[in-house]
Image: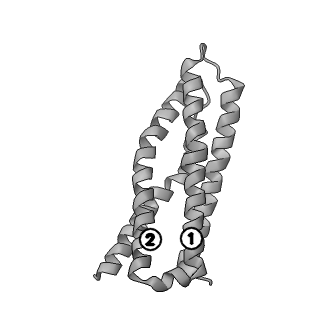
Amino acid sequence: MTLYGGLVLIHVLAAVIGMGPSFIFPVIQSFGTTKESLQLVNKIMEKAEKVVTIGSIVLLLTGLVMGVMNPHLFTQIWYIASIILYFVAHYLAVGFAGKRTKKAAALLNNHQGDDIPNEILTLNKTIGMAGMGSALIAIVMIILMSVKPF
C-alpha cells in the first residue's frame, strides 16, 4: 500500500467515526421520553461526542494532507465543496447542536420533578433537526467524494 493509499484508508475510517454517528444520534435522542431516560441519553451523547470529535478532526486533517500531496485536488469543485460542507456539518453537530445539548442537559439536571419542561423539548427538536441536517450533508459529501461529478 502506498502512503497515499494508507492516508485514504485512514480518511475513510475517520469519516465513519467522525460523521457516522450523525445518522444514529437523532435515533438515540428519541429514546429520551422521561427525565431519567433523557439524562441517560445525554450521558451517552456526551461520551460519544469525544470520539466523534477526534474522528472529525482526523477526517479534516487527512483530507487536507491528501490535497497537499495532490495539489490538483484544490482545483476540483467536488473537493472544495466537500471541505465547505464539512465545516457546515461540523458547525451543525458541534457548534449548534452541541451548545444546545449542553444547555438542555443543564436545564434538565436543575429541574425539579420527573417531567421534561417544554423548553428542553423545544431544544431537543432543534438538536434533532441539526443532527438530520448533518447526516444529509454527510450523504452529499460521500456522493461528492465517490462520484466526483465536477
Q: Which type of secondary structure does the marked residue at label 1 adopt?
A: helix
- Residue 20 against residue 66 in the figure, above or below: above
Res 98 seen here: yes
Residue 23 spot, x, y in % from top left: 56, 54
- Residue 44 against residue 36 in the figure, above or below: below
120 relative to 83 in the view: left or right = right
At x 60%, y 51%, the residue is: 92
- Residue 119 against residue 45 in the figure, above or below: above
Looking at the rendered structure, the kind of residue marked 1 is Ser
**What's the CA distance linking mark 1 and mark 2?**
10 Å
Q: Residue furthest top?
A: 112
- Assign the N terminus to one quadrant of the image: bottom left
Q: Earlier in the sequence, mark 1 or mark 2?
A: 2
Q: Quadrant of residue 100?
A: top right
- On residue 63, the disc is 2
At x 50%, y 82%, the residue is: 73
7 relative to 122 in the view: left or right = left
Circle 1 is placed at which residue position? 82
Q: Quadrant of residue 34?
A: top right
Q: Residues within 10 Å of mark 1 (few under 14, many from 20)?
A: many
Looking at the rendered structure, the kind of residue marked 2 is Gly
Verify CB contact (< 8 Å) between mark 1 and mark 2: yes
